[in-house]
Each structure stands twice: as structure tokens, then as C-alpha cells.
Image (cartoon, rainbow, N blue to C red):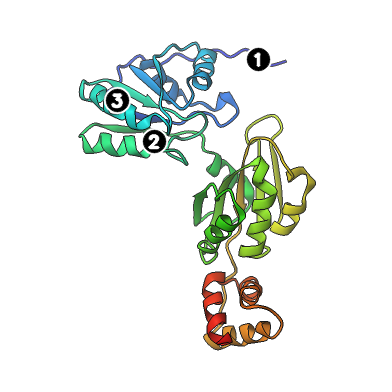
Amino acid sequence: MARPFILPVLDDAPLAPGLYVVATPIGNLRDITLRALDVLAGADVVLAEDTRVTGKLLSLYGLSAKLERYDEHGAERARPRILAALADGKRVALVSDAGTPLVSDPGYRLVREAAQGGHAVFAIPGASALLAGLSVAGLPSDRFLFAGFPPPKSAGRRTFLEELAGVRATLIFFEGGSRLAASLADMAAVLGDREAVVCRELTKLYETVVRGPLSELAADPQFTAPRGELVILVAPGRETEASAADIDTALADALTRLRPAEAAGEVAKALGLPRRDLYRRAMELKR
């Protein structure tokens, strides 16, 4: 039996004027911070991607606030009005539907213009899907790159991934369920069959974390078309000591059996090097 939620005593100290970038839960609504509740209770206006989603969060905690929609479609029109409110000494809170604002959304433009206008900007930290995924993945976390959503079509996605192939860091992506299997397959083809982790429904009742090589994850039936957005984490490529001569030898051997693009892909997987660079060298050797 679930325990009823008891709203903690909020800090009634007045908020300083400025823009507050407020993290909200990514699934479990109890992951809100006490400071975030203070800000949402004291703000003159709360900017939300979807006022219905944020309205449910506020209602759960017994808070009422003036809600205004702020998303990528209406941001350009809304910013002048928001900046004018900040100039009048208002307290403005910016939230996303889930997680930390500005991560894969257009809120950075508002923060930039507010700062350029001399207004205070405050970070109210909290939940973040990419950091939650990194914390449970078991992959190297001393260096990581958040790459956002890959392009929706395979050709663009492979070009996008080729640019990341040489990055010596754990790669983190967001992806929609309908494209998950195709994205994993393209990652295996371009990045090599690296160890990877797929996180679904983080912090929710049916939270799932699946680990394995990219090729196995791409073929996993449960990832054919899962619902919702997911976090994909891919291990760094292997460090290589291959010399230019070693690379040319490997490419020359592959070119006896394969076309240049395929030869570059095979050697990229074997040596952990960017496929694009190897393709250029393969074309030189072919000529």
C-alpha cells in the first residue's frame, strides 16, 4: 500500500528576481527536490514545454502557479515577453516535461539572452536521464559525450555516427522506441560491435537496463518497437597502436576482397578507427 505524500514545509523566503532553470522528475514524481518545490511555489510564472504535464506535477504537490507554454514552436515569439518580465524584476522558472531543461531542448537561447541582458540565472539541479543511465550502465564514466538524438534516417544516422567513431569516451544517445532497433544496428555497423547498454523507463515501475554487444541488442526482440524514449550508452572504442603501415596493410588485404567502403568498415571495426578516414585512405590505395 502506497504511503500518502506529505508536502514538506516550504522555505517561505522570497526568491531573488531572475531566471530559474528547474529540473523535474524523469519518471518517478518523488524525485523532485525540495529546492525545486520552493522555486515552483515562489515563481511569478513557470515556463513549461507542456502545461498539462507540469500542471499534474504541481497539483500532486499542492502547488498553484501561473503556467505558460514555452516550447520550440513558440519560443521565438515568447522570449521578448519573458525578457521584459525579467527586466521588471519577476521570478521566472523554466522546466521541461521531464529532467533537466536545456538537455536536448531549445531553452539555451532563453538562458543566453537573459544572461546577456544582465539578469541572474540560477540552476536548480535534479533528475537527468543521461546521468541516470550513466550511473547504472557500468561503462567508463570519467569521460563521456552526450550526442542527443541521432538523425531519423539511416544514411544521415551513419554519417552522424562516423563523426563520433574516434571519440575516446562513452557515447550517450536519446532515441525513440520506433527507431531503436535500426539505430542499434547502424551503431554496430559504424562503431563496431562495442559493449552497450539500453535503458528504458528509468525510475519508473518497469525500469529496464539491458547490457550486451550492439549487434545482440539490435537483434533483441524486446527492442523491436518499445514505447517511449530510451537512453543508449556505448562503450569507448578500443585504443589502438596501429601504425600507418599497419593500417595500409590491413586496408590492402581487405581491398582484395571488398569494395573500398566495405574495406574501410571492416578495418574500422578491427582497429577502432574512424571509418571516414579509412575510406579516404582506401580510395587512395585503390587508385
Asked if marks 2 and 3 touch (Cβ < 8 Å), the reply is: no
Work out how far the residue at label 2 is from the one at label 3, CA to CA, in angstroms.
Answer: 12 Å
Assess whether mark 1 and mark 2 are in contact (beta carbons under 8 angstroms). Answer: no
Q: Residues within 10 Å of mark 2 (few under 14, many from 20)?
A: many
Distance from the alpha carbon under mark 2 to that under mark 1: 36 Å
Residue position for label 2? 107
Closer to the chain start, of discs 2 and 3, is 3
Can residue 274 be seen? no
Q: Nearer the viewer, mark 2 or mark 1?
A: 2
Cα gap from disc 1 to disc 3, whole angstroms: 39 Å
Q: With 118 as the anchor, is 62 left or right in this view? A: right
Q: Secondary structure at mark 2?
A: loop
- Residue 134 relative to residue 78: left or right: right
Query: Which quadrant of the figure has residue 44?
Result: top left
Picture coordinates of residue 104, whole percent (x, y): 47, 41
Location of mark 1 (residue): 3
Q: Is residue 16 above or below residue 230?
A: above
Measuring 65% from the left and 15% from the top, which residue is drawn there?
3
Q: Secondary structure at mark 3?
A: helix
Which residue lies under the disc numbered 3? 82
| Residue 97 against residue 242 in the figure, above or below | above
